[in-house]
Image (cartoon, grey):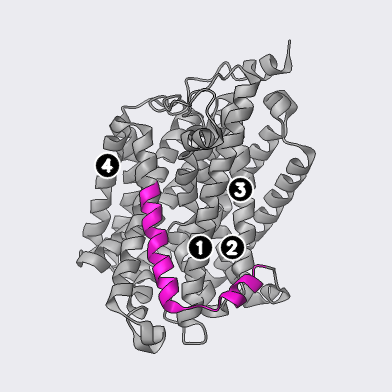
Amino acid sequence: MSEQKEHHELFEHADGSSLEEINDTVEIPKGGNFFKNLLAFSGPGALVAVGYMDPGNWITSIKGGAEYGYLLMSVILISSLIAMLLQYMAAKLGIVTNMDLAQATRAHTGKFLGGFLWITTELAIMATDIAEVIGGAIALKLLFGFPLVVGVALTILDVLLLLLLTKLGFRKIEAIVVTLILVIMVVFIYQVIIAQPDMAAAFENLVPKKEILHPGQLHMALGIVGATVMPHNLYLHSSISQTRQFDRKDKASIKNAIKFTTWDSNLQLTAAFIVNCLLLLVGAALFFGKDTSNLGTFADLYNALQDPNLAGAVASPVLSVLFAVALLASGQNSTITGTLSGQIVMEGFIHLKMPLWARRLMTRLIAVVPVLIIAIIYHGEENALDSLLVNSQVFLSVALPFSMIPLTIFTSSKKIMGEFINSKWVTILAWVCTIVLTILNMQIVMETIKAIL
């Protein structure tokens, strides 16, 4: 039996394809040139990149710039490079095995361990969605004055948007996500131009400095890393990498798919890297050297952008409105990908089949309910929701190893991946990243627990 046949037979017991309604639906040109192929494969990377510029990243990147200037630019760069490696492995797993990470994990674990991993992953996706709901609700309040409880309830309508887009085709989902990413990027490019940061210092700090290891700087650096690498992205990419039509039994076609999917992913994650750099540049240029003790929430940042005492001569209500628009775009983007991730995990781990609208609605309600409860109990106080957002990011830190470790094991297994197994240097680098990120994220958890006690 050939290796190619053997590693495909290992997965024949899978209960259906990942995201059956969109799997294998996007046509690929036959014999097209590099750019035609790249265009055809472009899209999934954008949905993945959204997770690296979600509301959780905003607070850490802007505050990192406000408190430490341009020092943490290197942390954003390193986090982005790690993301590129992990997403490459996740996409390759889906393309080679025709299974997403949830299906592959369930296929290689017993009932008890599979159940535990499913619950952990569902909680992580719920935590991710909580951050997006909070970001969207706060943006609606800042822009339109909606009470937070109303804003949270309105985010349920995102499910209807996603249902409509799914009926129109997966390419429509990709298109709207790319559009919203461009909105975020344009807003912050404009804000950076207005803020006039010290670009020489910014580029200089792309090389790590020893000052990062000081306690305060290290804590903020850990926060940036923890908010950047999220477990749901690994499940998402391993699934949506299968949306392209190609001969899944032909080695050359598989290699081609891996090649262009990797190009797509790296280009989109480069865009996410730029957005996070822009966030830090805005924080450093406008707020570094000033009192940043009251810049811990989105509302604080919104107000600071129109306060001459903090933003200086460039302070303007226009900057604040653009900030809120970008925040709303970020929340909408992350909502789309979070909902898809919830469906992937539910089907992959427990093979639960539900009507499409019910799966979407349940995923969203699971996230909306705790946010609504907190908003009602604390009478819509933004500080309470911001605290919930921070705690959701901490839980993602706890859940991260449960996704990274199986991914690294699977893609490093010749029995599973055949000739598409990770090279030795990729395997070594993947394990180093997995171990280091796990240790760093555990440190975030311990520091959070100490702060609470």
Query: Which badge, 3 or 2, comes first in the chain's sequence?
Result: 2
Q: Residue at x 42, y 60 (%)?
A: 185
Asked whether the viewer can see residue 444, the reply is no
> Where on the picture, by quarter, is residue 163?
top left
Q: Pick the residue in front: 251 or 215.
A: 251
Query: Which badge, 1 or 3, comes first in the chain's sequence?
Result: 3
Name the amino acid type tagged 3.
Met
The residue identified by callout 3 is 84
Q: Pick the residue in front: 220 or 275.
A: 275
Q: Is residue 291 left or right of residue 84?
A: left
Give the magenta range: 178-206
Q: Quadrant of the C terminus?
A: bottom right
Q: Nearer the viewer, mark 4 or mark 1?
A: 1
Asked whether the viewer can see residue 50, the reply is yes
Total marks shown come to 4
Mark 3 to mark 4: distance in Å?
29 Å
The residue identified by callout 1 is 276
The residue identified by callout 2 is 76
Q: Whole-percent x and y of residue 191? A: 40, 72
Mark 2 to mark 1: distance in Å?
7 Å
Query: Which badge, 2 or 1, comes first in the chain's sequence?
Result: 2
Mark 4 to mark 2: distance in Å?
32 Å
The residue identified by callout 4 is 161
SS of the residue under disc 1: helix
Q: Is residue 101 left or right of residue 414?
A: left
